Amino acid sequence: MMSTLTVFSAPKPFSDPHINIIQRNAVRSWKALGPRAEVLLIGDEQGIKEAAEESGVRHIPQVERNDQGTPLVSSIFNLAREYSSHGILVYLNADIILLPECLAVIDAVLARRKDFLLVGQRWDLDITRELKFTGDWSAALEDRLEREGRLHNYTAMDYFIFPRHLLRDIPPFAVGRAGWDNWMIYNAVNQPWPVIDLTPSHRVIHQNHDYRHLPGGAAHYNLEESHHNVALAGGMRTSFDLLDVPLVFQDGEIRKKGFSLRRTLRKLERIIMPAEQQGWRWQLTRILRKLGREVERRGLS
């Protein structure tokens, strides 16, 4: 079965020179997937309309926002569903380059499951110039990825792939802030739909950047909107990450993940985690989290 996809994203303003470069690279990589994929850019931030016209993709400007002016995840996903021409939706952060291998992987999963949420770790790569997506562009980029890329840890969820009839009741999270992507995995696991980790079979490239576009130039974890997202999600107990994904797609098959020390520590953390971030159980949760990260750092997982 050959799937057709709608790839969608809500880019940041294209005003920062580096953000401008990496977002244009990302959009061009999606467009380079060919006729099996349509691309939607959602929002009216500076430069989105022009980037869409330049890349020959569709622009959907009328996104809903919160009181701070940040686009809402619920609106972004609803607009993608409304304007999509295809049955499979692919949400990506706007700094993510897709490789053509994603088409075969999605086809293989779709042949085995009707309902699913596909996620995975990203590969970080320093890219500071515009890339060309002509000829055998993916081979050159994959070679560079092997030499210079770094597999990110389990906490970053930069893409979600799912059939369009799923994920219809997303709370009004602020996009680009912490918490909402964790809820996506929590929600799917508890439906239950098959939540499948594509990391061994599917690579996405995250183009490294700083956080000058955010207040104070710092990462989003401690912003008020991030705390609001976590509260909307139902608290820290809903803050799932890729360690909480039960299935993996590897060697052409969907199977349960095997034993690992890292995932065992994560399960203990989940059992002990209190509703509020205080008290002895919260302190023990933090100790288990630090121990898990150390296990991961030493490659013992």
Image (tube, rainbow, N blue to C red):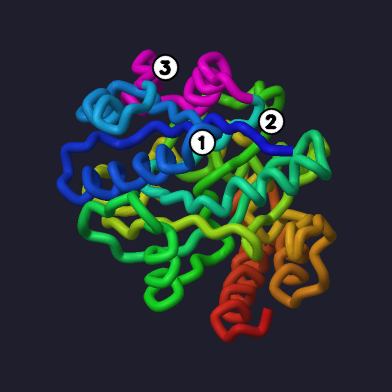
Quadrant of the snapshot with the C terminus: bottom right
The alpha-carbon separation of the residues under discs 2 and 1 comes to 24 Å
Residue depicted at 72% across the width and 54% down the height = 245
Give left or right: position of 233 versus 91.
right
Observer able to see residue 59 = yes
User: Quick check: 137 above or below 184?
Assistant: below
Q: On the image, numbered disc 2 is attached to which residue?
A: 163
Give left or right: position of 253 versus 92.
right
The part of the image, by quadrant, that contains residue 231 is top right
Q: Position of residue 276 (x, y in %)?
A: 63, 48
Mark 3 crowd level (few <14, some 14–19, many ≥20, 10 Å Cα): some
Is 285 one of the magenta-colored residues?
Answer: no
Residue depicted at 36% across the width and 40% down the height = 27
Q: Earlier in the sequence, mark 3 or mark 2?
A: 3
The alpha-carbon separation of the residues under discs 3 and 2 comes to 23 Å
Q: Residue 229: which numbered mark, if any?
A: 1
The magenta region covers 59-86
Q: Residue 64: which numbered mark, if any?
A: 3
The part of the image, by quadrant, that contains residue 9 is top left
Q: Earlier in the sequence, mark 1 or mark 3?
A: 3
Q: Nearer the viewer, residue 232 or 257?
A: 257
Q: Position of residue 81 (x, y in %)?
A: 57, 20
Q: Nearer the viewer, residue 54 or 82?
A: 54
Residue depicted at 80% across the width and 34% down the height = 114
Q: Earlier in the sequence, mark 2 or mark 1?
A: 2
Q: Nearer the viewer, mark 1 or mark 3?
A: 3
Q: Nearer the viewer, mark 3 or mark 2?
A: 2
For the residues labelled 3 and 2, say whether their Cβ atoms are less than 8 Å apart.
Answer: no
